[in-house]
Image (cartoon, rainbow, N blue to C red):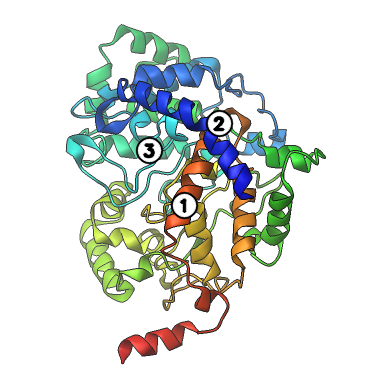
Amino acid sequence: MGARRWLSVACTLGFALAAERAAAQSAKAPHGALAMSEQEKRLDKLSLGGSSGAPPARVTPSTWAATIPADNALTPERVALGRKLFFDPRLSADGTVACATCHDVSRGFTDQRPVAEGIGGKLGRRNAPTVLNAMFFTSQFWDGRAALLEDQAKLPILNPIEMGMPNGDAVIAKIGSDSDYVKMFQAAYSRAPSYDDVGRAIGAFERTLVFLDAPFDRWQDGDSKAMSADAVKGFALFSGKARCVACHPINASSPIGSDNRFHNIGVSARHQDFESLAGKALAELAKGGDSQQVLDRLALETDLSELGRFLVTKRRSDVGSFKTQQLRNVAVTAPYMHDGSMQTLWDVMDHYNKGGEANPYLDGGIEPLALSDEEVDQVVELLFTMTDRRLGDENAREMTRQHDLAATQRPFRDTALAMRKVLPFEQRLQKEK
């Protein structure tokens, strides 16, 4: 994007951003989240669809039907119950953490932190992905350890460093005496509150968070002015030289831009000995079993987190592999990667451009791309067009913030590797000397 356009965006947003920051500081909830009441006000302005069971805009009926479990058909009553639970910090042991703490409406339904913070200020080992469009994933979490949103919703409530409740019975004991909840569970599921229905209801609410109406979509619909010339060039690179489409297909059956598979792209390889970690993981799993709760603990509380999908499958081919994240609304969900180690989309592109980080388990499709700085800029500009129009203001702010940050630091850029002037094994030999 040209310098004049960046400057224009920055000037336009300047006063509005300062005012919003001042207002946000006066409406903070614990752990840095926006107050729950303020988040709900913002949610009301987003015009969500799907609660009646009909497919939202830009989702085909067959795709929509395939993502909804038979035992949790969407109804307004279930969505309303799930929404109440999503914003309720009483689901945590100390009453300070709700689902919306780490999936903040004002932050792209994530927390925009490297790793999530739970009760007592405890930090996990992984970045909190957005719940926007999460229903389109065929598995949940970075390592796919949960199959459905309904399964995913329950685990953080019981994890000791996230929401910290001892068990499902304790959750129901805490909210079961609330007459509003009793009525809402009865209306939604025709029975008394249960922990399984807590997960079902939160899952139902999260299925309404479909955000697929972006400038990119309008351009694909035939509006030639919906994207800039650089973004159009970025799409040609995305589909060709940059090879993004290999793992990030975007089409009617894959609307979010993820292949729903797991890949080692070398992020953890910068600082981890995979062989040693894998041995420790197998010993831990043999000792404690491989239930969802055990996997949840290892993934969020130990260095074994860096093994990714291997913790679930125990397959060597999955060492250091993590789920391909969606590209939808990616601009408003920084920082990036499972550990939140990349601050901007320029960091992400620099990482891929140099061929990731060499390691014995690196995905075979990861190799240097030889993209020029101009081509990197064009792909990044394309990615900014994939944000839903309802998040346009946040997208513009992030465009300015990330552009300014990338202008001063590009820690993952390595032109020699990207252009194949030097090969990874040569660097390794030089370090060994």
Q: Distance from label 3 to label 2 (Cα)?
A: 25 Å
> Badge 3, how many Cα within 10 Å: few under 14, some, many 20+?
many
The percent coordinates of residue 41 (x first, y second) are 45, 16
Query: Tag 3's secondary structure?
Result: loop
Residue 91 visible within the image: yes
Q: Helix, strand, or loop for circle 1?
A: loop
The CA span between labels 2 and 1 is 21 Å
Q: Are marks 1 and 3 in contact (CB under 8 Å)?
A: no
| Residue 328, horizontal then vertical, whole percent | 58, 43
- Say which amino acid is labelled 2: Thr
Q: Residue at x 61, y 73 (%)?
A: 370
Q: Is residue 61 left or right of residue 147?
A: right
Q: In this image, 158 relative to 16: left or right?
A: left
Q: Which residue is mark 1?
A: 344
Q: Earlier in the sequence, mark 1 or mark 3?
A: 3
Image disc number at residue 12: 2
Of residues 145 and 419, which is closer to you in this image?
Answer: 419
Checking the image for residue 111, the label placed there is: 3
Could you tell me the amino acid type at mark 1? Thr
